[in-house]
């Protein structure tokens, strides 16, 4: 059986088993596509949460976009490091130079962009400042109000100000804690330093120069909702079935174009970006996004306690999903069921995109599927 046939079987088993309604994967070996498969249906429930009969479901098309969730952070890191490369930002300069809220005490004054990109800033994992105003907006809705597509929270400046005030839970540079809050704080730094909206920076510094024409924020704004696979059914947030709008609630509340989440792409564009990371042709990708930063930043050889690490934007050697042979791999996962993995020693780029949160986030995880796809790719070497 060919590599592509085995990859298709893995995806079919996952879709048939209810892990996700849609799945797409690409394995690139030494720069050439060795296997590619797109399987499943874009949704199993309609906008009202009613089950769609199997015969009426729409098959996932080639070129379908998936919500990348936290895989967005890899593009965000690339964008931020391009700004470092051009001298707009400094990796080890205090972010207080750009954010006045970080001038209030010694710990906050010590936070740098390097801390934010390595999840060692001391910021908490998530920011919940959107929740109270959103609950107030829900309470004010009349009976029969329409489903939200865009967030109803129009005062984005107030939300950003609340994000900037997020309290540290640890002094910077001591502990690793995965923090969406840190990446969105880095976004605020970049916007303050440049005076430009985050989405424009990502487009100018990353998407356009790398030729990633099928990667974008807010596809519904461009009338592309039908090209996107569905994610979660969220009646409790008055969103219905989320499709073409970012799944992540904090990103959605901030407008859907943030550093922690919000990008949508097809599997081929993610593979193109993965190849940029694997080839490492600039300092951004060759060193900053590749070298494990944690021992230097924290002063401890194994700060995560499991032998894994983190570069500026990528995770290092997470064999739980990168496979037993992935000790030298770099990559990132996304909550919606996405991942990108690159391995220079093996010459591999591995992309898996699913909508594992459809119709609910409480279904099966995709860690085993990610690992199976990775091990299949390594076995072909």
Image (tube, rainbow, N blue to C red):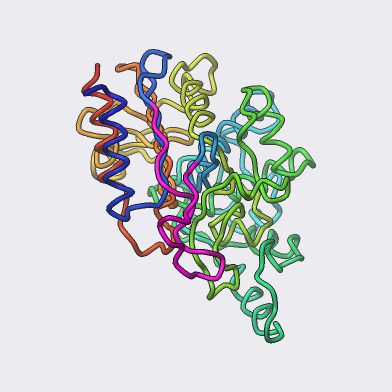
The N terminus: image quadrant: top left
Q: Which of the 4 image quarters holds residue 248?
A: bottom right
The residue depicted at 75 percent of the width and 44 percent of the height is: 197
Q: In this view, does 99 lie to the left or right of 330?
A: right
Residue farthest right in this picture: 195
Q: Compared with residue 154, is residue 205 higher up or lower down, i.e. above or below?
A: above
Residue farthest front in this picture: 55
The residue depicted at 43 percent of the width and 62 percent of the height is: 53
Give percent across and percent down for residue 342. 38, 26
Q: Compared with residue 343, is residue 155 higher up or lower down, i.e. above or below?
A: below
Q: Is residue 61 left or right of residue 252?
A: left
Q: Give 176 or 280, whichever is nearer the viewer.
A: 280
Give percent across and percent down for residue 127. 54, 62
Whether residue 377 is visible: yes
Q: Is residue 137 magenta?
A: no
How would you classify the magenta stretch by its main secondary structure?
Answer: loop
Q: Give 240 or 314, whichever is nearer the viewer.
A: 240
The residue depicted at 44 percent of the width and 49 percent of the height is: 41
Whether residue 292 is visible: no
The residue depicted at 52 percent of the width and 14 percent of the height is: 281
Number of marks in the rendered image? 0
Give percent across and percent down for residue 301. 28, 36
Q: Which of the 4 image quarters holds residue 359?
A: bottom left
The stretch in magenta equals 36-60
The C terminus: image quadrant: top left
Q: Give 101 or 254, whichever is nearer the viewer.
A: 254
Q: Is residue 48 magenta?
A: yes
């Amino acid at each position: 059986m060919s590599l592509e046939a085995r990859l298709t079987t893995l995806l079919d088993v996952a879709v048939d088993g209810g892990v996700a309604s849609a799945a797409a994967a690409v394995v690139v070996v030494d720069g050439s596509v060795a296997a590619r498969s797109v399987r499943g249906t874009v949704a199993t429930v309609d906008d009202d949460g009613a089950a769609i009969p199997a015969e009426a479901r729409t098959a996932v098309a080639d070129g379908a976009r998936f919500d990348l969730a936290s895989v967005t952070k890899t593009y965000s890191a690339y964008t931020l490091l391009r700004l470092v490369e051009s001298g707009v930002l400094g990796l080890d300069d205090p972010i207080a130079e750009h954010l006045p809220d970080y001038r209030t005490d010694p710990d906050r004054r010590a936070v740098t962009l390097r801390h934010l990109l390595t999840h060692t800033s001391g910021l908490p994992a998530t920011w919940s400042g959107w929740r109270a105003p959103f609950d107030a907006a829900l309470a004010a809705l009349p009976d029969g109000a329409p489903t939200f597509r865009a967030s109803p929270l129009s005062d984005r400046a107030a939300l950003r100000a609340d994000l900037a005030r997020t309290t540290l839970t640890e002094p910077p540079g001591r502990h690793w804690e995965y923090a969406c809050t840190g990446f969105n704080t880095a976004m605020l730094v970049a916007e303050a330093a440049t005076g430009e909206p985050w989405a424009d920076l990502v487009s100018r510094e990353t998407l356009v120069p790398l030729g990633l024409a099928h990667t974008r924020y807010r596809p519904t704004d461009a009338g592309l909702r039908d090209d996107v696979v569905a994610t979660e059914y969220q009646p409790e947030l008055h969103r219905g079935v989320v499709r073409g709008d970012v799944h992540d609630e904090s990103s959605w509340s901030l407008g859907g174009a943030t550093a922690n989440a919000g990008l949508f792409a097809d599997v081929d564009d993610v593979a193109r970006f993965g190849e940029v990371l694997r080839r490492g042709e600039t300092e951004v990708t060759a060193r900053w996004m590749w070298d494990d930063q944690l021992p230097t930043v924290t002063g401890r050889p194994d700060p995560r306690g499991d032998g894994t690490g983190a570069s500026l934007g990528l995770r290092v050697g997470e064999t739980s999903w990168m496979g037993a042979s992935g000790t030298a791999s770099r990559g990132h996962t996304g909550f919606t069921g996405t991942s990108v993995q690159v391995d220079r020693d093996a010459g591999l780029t591995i992309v898996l995109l699913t909508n594992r949160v459809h119709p609910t986030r409480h279904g099966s995880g995709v860690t085993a599927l990610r690992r199976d796809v990775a091990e299949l790719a390594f076995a072909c070497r």
